[in-house]
Amino acid sequence: MAPRPQNQKRRPESARRANRIIQTRTLLLLGVFGVLTFVLLFTQLYHWQITEHDELQSVAVRQQTLRTTVEASRGTIYDRNGTILAMSASAEDIFISPKEIIENDQDQNLIAGGLAEILDLDPADILKKMEKTTSQYEILVKKADDELADKVREFINENDLKGVFIRPTSKRTYPKGTLASQVIGFANENGGAMGLEAAYNDELTGENGMVVTARDRDGRSVLYQYDQYFDAENGCDLHTTLDTTIQYYLEKGVQELEARFGTGKGAEGIVMDVNTGAVLAMASLPTYDLNSPGTVYNDFLTSGMTEEQIEENMKDLLNKQWRSKAINDTYEPGSTFKTLTLAMALEENVVDLNTGFYCSGSVKIEGETINCSKRAPGHGQQNLTQAFANSCNPAFINIGLRIGNDKFYQYMLDFGLTEKTGVDTTGEASGFVNSEIKYSTLALACYAFGQNFNVTPIALLAAQCACVNGGYLYTPYLVEEITDQDGNVVSKHDSTPIRQVVSEETSALVRDIMEYEVTSGTGKNGQVAGYRIGGKTGTADKVGGGVIVSFVCFAPADDPQVMMLLTLDEPSKWTGTYVSGGNMVAPVASSVMGEILPYLGIEPSYTAEELVGADSSTWGPEEHTALADAEAAAGIEMDIPDAIGEYSPTAFLTWYERAYIDAVYTDGEGNIAAHVRKAAGDEDISGDYNDYSETSAQEIGGHSVTVKGEGGKIMTAVWADGGYSFSVSVDGGLTADELAALIAEVK
């Protein structure tokens, strides 16, 4: 029988209890930890699956897809006949993927060198872009033309390159180059920058589309997988009021005006439909090429400047050529404003066709003497029509005073001259009307003949149209309608007039008086054979010196269809032409109107005189090489110095229907250095209207001589003797003794 085992020693009850407690706590802690872990995991899963579901899904999609933008085409800009003025043409962006170049172990130096040569870039710059090894997209050239893109494409194929790409896009092109540049404006990468391109940027800009393509984990497109296309929506098209042919005629005239009489300060012109406010043409000098807006186009802007100076002043130079003088700048209108004063007075019945005015050559207002264009004895007695045709300042001062301050100011408001016209383009300036017009007699007197306030040419022309179209003021506009990519009309201009400023009866009288101004007054050089033309000349003093010459005209005078304003800023006094709107601007306007009217289908009707070959529009100087020939043509005799300093007389000019001789002295290179002039009458014939700091009347050689100059130098001298006016103008000036010696020789 086996032995009975001995009894083992048992643990105390307290130890067993402690173990149970530890086990319980352990289980409890494990349970709490499990619950907390579950809560945390649940919270995170909720965050991922619910809160950030959309974003995470987007990330996942982006990781699995390649999205390529399909650029929308910018809308086309047309003239009123459907001629394209601005369009989007095909182009291509050229870029590299540094990531793919590295992954495919491409020869970086080969790529950088080859592309640099083709694209005219620095190889180092391309290599620097390649250092961004995580980048899929580094642009090299935007909107390259087809020829450049084809060279890159050939380079890629010849070298079996990976990571060099060409992507189709579009670029803005302007088929007419410089034509209507300030009106159309241009677009850059940020959209429309100037002109209509900027004003209608929202309408012209389309909405880009997209192509979504499947790709693998390395970012490569997966063949035979899905593509999704989201079509681009092209921008709307603008159908403008511009007429390419009329624009060409106007620009040719403006360029002629600047070339013949300008000093580089610029010129502008506008042609407007009298009965709607539609702008048919608008031009401004200096101009620029829309296809290269960052290049200074006009040489006179940089004349005398070094390359460094050009670079330093590039921003200012570009702004000068981009701005439209017709809209962005303001001028004193001068005598062209007399048309509005005339309309006011007729409407208020303070004058009629029989009202008489006496002009002695000047008038004194509040202690200030205001001269007429014809100095003493002045125009003498004249009626309303004659006073307008003579552009008589004293007469129109009288008319302005009859209207009165309050009514005159109200008409300034009614004609829209104190605010912007609202023309549909960028940068329009507001006219400046001094508050003194409300109470000052002197201010009223100056306003009456167009001085001491500023207006934009576009506002002045709109007001002039109101004077001849029956009295209706229209908002000038450039866009007739907007159509979408399917040709549907999105919007159309409403040509309802803003208000009627004067009556039909007043307007008819204004038309008649303006026609007389062209047939018999200061605007006779604006006549066009076969057509009835109405108009008004203007010569306005500028604050700070210099003058602005202008001419406004409309046709046909009995049934107005178009109206034009031409303006030249600070004409040269050295051209041999008397500085005035009638002598400088009106002849050019005649030429432009002579082309526009037949083009518009307005038939001419020739007078008997015109049919036999008389040239009623003959104007300006006739040039002679000998003084004797000039004397015979002018019907007067003249003595002049054989030389003024180093300069000799090389040409002698006479004027149509006027006893007038201008001896022109030039240097050996043909540059004009001096003028000596003689004319019947006692007017200032110098043509120098600059505001010199030193002006005085002196007794020289028995003559009362008005001398003008600065810095101790006499630039111009004017005197009268024996029924004739004389003037001497010398570039660089004369001393008092030199002038006295010169005057002694001029007879």
Image: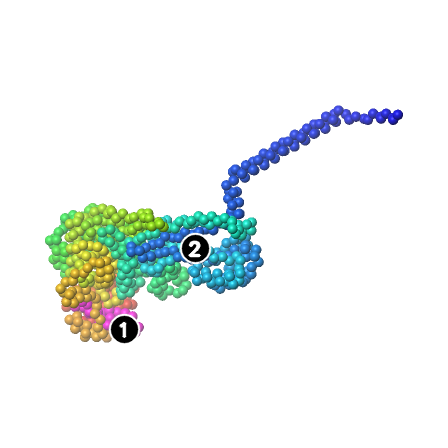
Give me the residue at 14% from left, 57% from top: 386
For the C terminus, the quadrant is bottom left
- Residue at the limit of the structure toward the right, as seen here: 1
Give the camera-side residue of 476 and 94.
94
Local secondary structure at mark 2: strand
Q: What's the distance in space between the residues labelled 1 and 2, CA to CA?
A: 62 Å
| Mark with earlier residue (1, 2) | 2
Horizontal side, residue 67 vs residue 513: left or right? right
Horizontal side, residue 672 vs residue 515: left or right? right
Is residue 654 in view? yes
Tag 1 residue: 647
Give me the residue at 16% from left, 50% from top: 506
Give me the residue at 57% from left, 35% from top: 42
Look at label 2 and name its amino acid.
Thr
Horizontal side, residue 455 vs residue 634: left or right? right
Give the camera-side residue of 638 and 696.
638
Residue 680 x, y percent position in the rendering? 16, 67
Q: Which residues are magenta?
A: 651-676
Q: Main SS type for the magenta part?
A: strand
Give the camera-side residue of 350 and 125.
125
Residue 564 x, y percent position in the rendering? 24, 57
Tag 2 residue: 169
Q: In the image, which disc is placed on residue 459?
A: none
The image quadrant that residue 306 belongs to is: bottom left
The image quadrant that residue 389 belongs to is: bottom left
For the N terminus, the quadrant is top right
In reply to whether residue 294 is colored magenta, the answer given is no
Crowding at dot 1, Cα within 10 Å, few <14 / some 14-19 / many 20+, comes out as: some
